[in-house]
């Protein structure tokens, strides 16, 4: 039996969230580390809301190169870092922290990950971005809307169970509109892109029950939930003949900038389908 020792030189990074045990990020980063024989480790760190400030100080003190931030701390992390990059500032959330000269630098790579994931599936960019319908208005929706605007989306419609909470998203641009869930049908017939950013359909959460009957067969459908890999929304959309994109690619793409900053190498993604299959099998995402 061979035990690989953690040494004083071992580069440390991790993911902070609560709960965090379900996160696939440790499996993903440690797979990349092993494949590149990098002396590094990436660990899940369960931290509650009241301990976030202390955890941030602790990261620097014990020599972490940085971390990812997941639910529910992305907005809080924005307040706790020393410097924030422009994208994270605009989105209003930090999902990646890099420690540099004992300072915490905050980034957001969710928008990048979202766009890189769906880009290869888009045949006609102008047509697909003509009318995007976003389900949900939480932290991930903010990153998705940012990515869509950057990519040139003409019209974005947000479906929120509490439209008031989503108002700040509409302030980003006048072509962003909001309505409540019961209005979904009105918007589906003209939608060219449908994105679920709610946790509905996620393992252990409520099942989704979006009725897609009015959705055009030409619309691209994506779900940022990746456990299970084929959510009810994606299954329903596929059955109707719509092209679909699962959320696992977003997780993989959003992880790249952090990995590169902490461990000094950027993994190539030529074999992303192989990597996805490995995560699906080992992570039990069936
Ligand atoms: P969040 O900030 O809690 O936002 C969730 C949104 O969904 C809120 O607008 C919430 O509405 C809405 N929602 C929740 N339950 C609903 C329901 N039953 N019906 C209608 N709307 C509902 O969470 P988040 O950070 O945006 O994350 C959302 C999901 O995306 C999570 O499942 C997360 O794992 C996933 N995600 C995936 C990736 C990836 O890399 N693939 C990256 C980020 C996030 P209220 O505001 O009214 O509660």
Image (tube, rainbow, N blue to C red):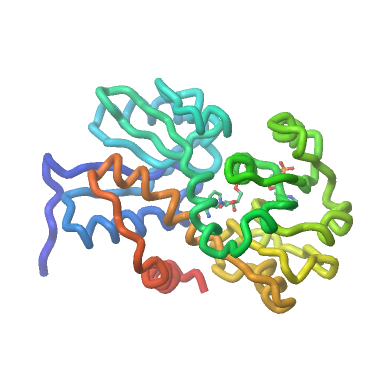
Q: Quadrant of residue 4?
A: bottom left
| Residue drawn at x 78%, y 48% as measured from the top left | 159
User: Looking at the picture, how far across and down is residue 80, in whole percent?
Assistant: 46, 24
User: Looking at the picture, how far across and down is residue 238, in whole percent?
Assistant: 67, 75
From the viewer's side, name the closer residue of 145 and 206: 145
Give the quadrant of the N terminus: bottom left
| Residue drawn at x 39%, y 44% as measured from the top left | 15
Regarding residue 122, the answer to whether it shows in the image is yes
From the viewer's side, name the closer residue of 138 and 129: 129
Q: Is residue 69 above or below residue 27?
A: above
From the viewer's side, name the closer residue of 67 and 184: 184
Q: Quadrant of residue 37?
A: bottom left
Left or right of 174 in this view: 100: left
Regarding residue 203, the answer to whether it shows in the image is no
User: Looking at the picture, how far across and down is residue 195, in whole percent?
Assistant: 67, 56
User: Looking at the picture, how far across and down is residue 156, in whole percent?
Assistant: 73, 45
From the viewer's side, name the closer residue of 248 and 203: 248
| Residue drawn at x 32%, y 23% as measured from the top left | 103
| Residue drawn at x 48%, y 30% as measured from the top left | 77
């Amino acid at each position: 039996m061979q035990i690989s020792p953690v040494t004083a030189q071992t580069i440390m990074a991790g993911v902070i969230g609560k709960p965090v045990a379900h996160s696939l990020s440790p499996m993903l980063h440690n797979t990349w580390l092993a494949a590149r024989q990098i002396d590094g480790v990436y660990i899940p760190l369960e931290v509650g809301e009241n301990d976030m400030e202390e955890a941030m100080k602790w990261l620097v003190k014990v020599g972490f190169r940085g971390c990812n931030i997941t639910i529910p701390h992305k907005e809080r992390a924005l307040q706790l870092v020393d410097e924030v990059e422009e994208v994270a500032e605009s989105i209003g959330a930090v999902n990646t922290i890099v420690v540099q000269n004992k300072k915490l630098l905050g980034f957001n790579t969710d928008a990048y990950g979202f766009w890189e994931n769906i880009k290869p599936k888009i045949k006609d960019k102008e047509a697909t971005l003509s009318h995007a319908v976003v389900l949900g208005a939480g932290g991930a929706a903010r990153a998705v809307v940012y990515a869509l605007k950057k990519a040139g989306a003409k019209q974005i419609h947000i479906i929120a169970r509490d439209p008031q909470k989503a108002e700040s998203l509409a302030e980003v641009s006048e072509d962003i509109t909001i309505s409540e869930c019961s209005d979904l049908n009105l918007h589906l017939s003209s939608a060219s892109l449908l994105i679920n950013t709610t946790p509905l359909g996620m393992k252990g959460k409520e099942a989704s029950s979006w009725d897609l009957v009015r959705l055009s067969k030409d619309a691209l459908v994506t779900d940022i939930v990746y456990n299970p890999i084929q959510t009810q929304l994606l299954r329903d959309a596929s059955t109707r003949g719509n092209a679909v994109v699962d959320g696992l690619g977003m997780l993989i793409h959003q992880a790249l900038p952090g990995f590169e900053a902490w461990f000094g190498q950027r993994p190539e993604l030529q074999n992303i389908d192989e990597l996805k299959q490995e995560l699906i099998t080992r992570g039990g995402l069936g």
